[in-house]
Structure formats: C-alpha cells, structure tokens
Amino acid sequence: MDTIIGIDLGTSTTEAAVMQDGKPVMVLNLENEIITPSAIGIDSAGNSIVGEKVRAQYLLSPENTVIEVKRKIGTGEKIKLGKQSFTPVDLSAKLLEYVKTYASEYLGREITHAVISVPAYFNDIQRQETVEAGTKAGLKVERILNEPTAAALSYGLDHMEEESHILVYDLGGGTFDVTLLEMFDGVMEVKASSGDNQLGGKDFDEKLMDWLISEFMKKNSVDLRKDTFAMVKLKEEAERCKKALSTEDSYHILIPMVTEKKGVPLALDETVTRKHFEEITQELIERTHHPIDVVLSDSGILPDEIDKVILAGGSTRMPLVTKDIREYLNIEAAQSLNPDFAVAEGAAIQAGIIQGVFSQEDSLIITDVNPYTLGIRVTDGITDNRMDVIIPRNATIPVTRSQTYYTYADYQTSANIEVYQGESMLADSNHFLGDFMIHDIPPKRAGVEKINVQFSYNLNGMLHVTASIPSTGADASISINMMKNEETEEDVSRWKEAPSAKQFRTVIRRAERMLKSLETGSFPTLEEDINENLYLLKKAILDEDINAAKGAEQELLDILND
Ligand SMILES: Nc1ncnc2c1ncn2[C@@H]1O[C@H](COP(=O)(O)OP(=O)(O)OP(=O)(O)O)[C@@H](O)[C@H]1O
Ligand SMILES: [Mg+2]
C-alpha cells in the first residue's frame, strides 16, 4: 500500500509527518527544516517558489509574494502574484506540491497520498477547496481531518489508558479552534467543536502594528500605511516583538529607515512591554471565550469537569493564553505537546489508522463531529424562509439523516432544495451552500406528495444531499455539487471612505473615464480587464491591503498607458 503522509497546511507554517515504527516522525523539507513558511512567490525569472526563500524575498518585493493564503480559501477571491492572478486553491496547491516534493525526496519514494488537516470550523466549501488543492498538487487526499482532533490524536497515542475530558485549544496563525473530547479505553470521542476562522497570531501582530502606526503618526505626522515597504518591515518586526514578549518582559523595536518625510529618513523606535502588549490584545484573547462556552454547553460538560487542556498552535506560546485559561476555566493548561508539530503528527497517525499500521489491541478509535448546523429552507404557513434543521451541529460523524416534506402548492411538480449551514432560524441569515431542483413530482393537491431529503455528512466533513419522491418509486435523487457555488462580488462602492482612497483616486478616475469613452461592447476584453482591476483595486482599498492595491493600480496604469 502507498505511504500516506499527514500534512498540517497552516496559515503561517506548513508541516508534514509520516508513521515510522508505530510513531509519527516529522518530515524535513529541502532545506532540512521541519517548519516551512506558508508563503508562495514568483522569482525574477517568473517561476513560482515556496517556503523559506519566499520569506526572504517578501521584504524586498512583497508584490511577488503571497502569505496567509489559508485565510482566503473558500472565498473565491482572486489573489495577485506578480502580474498574474490566482485562486486560493492554485496557491495552496503550490504549497502542497512543495510538500509532496520534499516528502518524496526525504522518504526516497514518490508520495501520492495524504491526510490533510483543516480547522474544525472550516465550512464545506473550504474543505472541498482543500481537497481540490491536494488533487491539483498530485496528492490523493485520503481524509480531511479536523486540526484539534489531530492534536488530540497526537496526545492520545501516548495517553491511551487515561479516562478523561480533554479540551484542545489550538490558536495558530490565522484560526482558533477548540474541541472537547472524551477518552476511554483507547476511544477518543469528539463531543463538540467550535472556533473562530478569523482569529489567530496574525491578529495579534496587527494589533501591535496599529499601535505602532498611531504612535508614529503622533510623533512624526506620517501615516506608515501609505508606505508598502514600511508596512512589510513593520509586520516582520511586530511579529518578532510579539514572539520575544512570550519570554521577555519588554522588547525594543528599532527600524532605522522605516520611511522618509520630505527626503529625510525617519526611524521607528519604540519599547513595548509585555504588560502593554497584553492590554492591547486583551480583546482578542476574550474572543476565545464564546467558542469555549459553546463547546462546553454543546457537550453538556461543566468547566470543573475538564481534566486537561491541551495546547496546540504557535500562538499558545503567549503567556496571555495560559493566563486567560487559568482565569476563565480555573485550570492549568499543559504544554504537553510540541505546539508546532502536534497537528501534523496527528494527521500522520490518522494516515496510519487508514493504512492499518496499528495492531488490534493498541488501536486508537476516534469519532468526530460536524461543527455546523445543516438544513434546508422550507415554506410553512408563516414564512418562506425557515431553516429546517436536518443535521444539528456537533452530531457525531459520519452521519446520515433524512426528513420528509410535503408539497405546499396544488399540482406542484417540482421543488427547489436550498441547502444552508448555520445557526439562525432564518435560512437567509445562514450560509447558503447550494441548491438543486427535484422534478417529476406527480401533480396532486398540496400536502399529498412526499419529498424525502437526505443529508449525509462523511468523515471528511463533507456533505452530500439527495432528494427523492417515494410515491413514484423512481430514483429521483440528485446530489449537490458544492463546487458550483458562485463567487459573490462584494459591494465596493464605499471605497472612497477608506483611509488610502486618496492615494489611488487619480488612477481610478482615469480608468473610469476610459471605460466611459469606450463604446460598450466594442473592446470586450479590454473592458473586462479594466472592470476587473477596478474592482480589485477598490476592494483592496476597502480591505486596506496596500500591496494588492498597488498591484491592481499597476495593472490599470499598464492598460491606460498602452
Ligand atoms: N514564541 C511565540 N510567541 C508568540 N507567538 C508565536 C510564537 N511562535 C510562533 N508564534 C505565532 O504562531 C503563529 C503560527 O502558529 P502555527 O504555525 O501553529 O499556525 P498555523 O498552523 O500556520 O495556522 P492555523 O492553524 O491558524 O492555520 C504565528 O502567528 C506566529 O507568530
Ligand atoms: Mg495550525
């Protein structure tokens, strides 16, 4: 059987592990490092590069570098890299291709199979896209595994006899995941999972950057946000400072020529104390409380019934994390795992389970849950927008549930099944996953014909929906294709209110004037190019993503000057 490797495809870093002699072993990359930065770039020759080389290039040419792609997965957003634009799937595939290459090199045989971990709180589209990225990289994805479940597996391998309630607290670069498990006789049962897809070390860096920028503004009346290079340096320094404050009481940031004012170079010179850092990031750490509450209440466990808190993710090295857990849950969190390796090791263990490397008696069994409520939109006497739950959140997976519905109109011959994911009672307020029509309903009076809707949620956390009409006996079931989800374009008309609008106003005005001067339909590709880049530019301004804005601006200038 082909070797399956475990991959932790992280927001900031990526790691891989493989089972050897019944234990997970970390795999070294081409630079003999375990940790690969999750960064993708284009070098001067136009070739894509991955990993440490890119991180080095990031300072010099940020426009040729992309970091933190994982935050964009599932959004359909295009990402600019050099002159080209990529989907998050394309870029994640490049990272995975690199992992495939180095793992094959390290193990001395071509690796074609993998288990990839994702945040428990990833929705179906994000999971689908992760599988797609794997496939694109030439890896058959055997299983998508929830990251905290992976961390728990890595812990469980050495603690199989213990009987306990374990809370896995995973604060990485971009996401926060919390999972409650119960362990007994080598069985690890995930009771509940929750989290925040948009909370991680990156946000701590940004809080610190915000503060440094405002101090710099006070002292020099210069807005560093307008200077791409200053922002890149600042981001590097902010992260370095944050990491140092995990062990030191204070840290001195000095960037000699961070920017210039009327030709005179200016330095950024600040001392940050841990106390101050903890004050400005307190609100971020408090955002972990809600998911913790959800996990406790969904699993019906009280805080004092937690036997152990396991930490995973690089950001749990911040002393603020253990302090907050102590205050909020009254328990001392254990640094019992290497927070950088635990998830990849767990993915390798899962791969080992699939390959049958564990013998019967020491076999680990793990059951997982789905983190979101899943259902369809139904029409009843009161509303046409009710979310009817088919699989409640935190149901143990794999799970298949069906529900019977009745036609609501006389002589109705078809029905549209709209699938949603989320906790609101109103379908519209939840996340729309997709829809499909079921036809061939015999025309009868309302309420006579039955429609069966079946949801199957598999071990990869992916959903399959089918509908059928029992009376005809015909197999009228259709499955839903999550990938058909359309990209939604955000309304970017409010770009003018964003802080960096002024900087790009002229180019936007010029491009819009050019659009007007073109007779509609006379140069369709040109029109499309301008529209696309105008959209990207306005969106980047709104997102305060100066790198992306400059990229789009350059594209527009190239078109205009042609
Ligand atoms: N000593 C430290 N003190 C504070 N933060 C740290 C330390 N070491 C690493 N980090 C932070 O940990 C984060 C990276 O952690 P990790 O590699 O676990 O994330 P990831 O797996 O890439 O992200 P995610 O799991 O969210 O997708 C970064 O934000 C980094 O700044
Ligand atoms: Mg991680």
Image: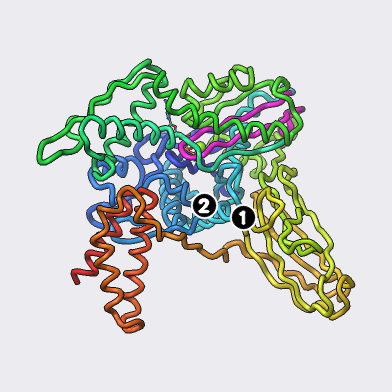
Q: Is residue 371 left or right of residue 134?
A: right
Badge 1 is on which residue? 431
Q: For this rendering, which residue is in front, 518 or 375?
A: 518
Residue 271 image offset from top left, x and y in percent: 29, 21
Is residue 423 positioned above or below 470 on the image? above
Badge 2 is on which residue? 112
Q: Is residue 22 visible?
A: no
Residue 22 image offset from top left, x and y in percent: 61, 32
Numbered mark located on residue 127 in the image = none
Q: Quadrant of the C terminus?
A: bottom left
Under circle 2, the secondary element is loop
The magenta span reads 164-189
Task: Give the residue type at disc 1.
Answer: His
Picture quarter containing residue 223? top left
Does the magenta-highlighted stretch encompass residue 172?
yes
Residue 30 image offset from top left, x and y in percent: 36, 41
Does the magenta-highlighted stretch encompass residue 363?
no
Q: Is residue 7 left or right of residue 50?
A: right
Q: For this rendering, which residue is in front, 168 or 45?
A: 168
Q: Earlier in the sequence, mark 1 or mark 2?
A: 2
Cβ of mark 1 under 8 Å from ligand 1: the answer is: no
Identify the residue at horizontal 33%, vertical 55% (top origin).
81
Circle 1 or circle 2, nearest the eye:
1
Q: Quadrant of ligand 1?
A: top left
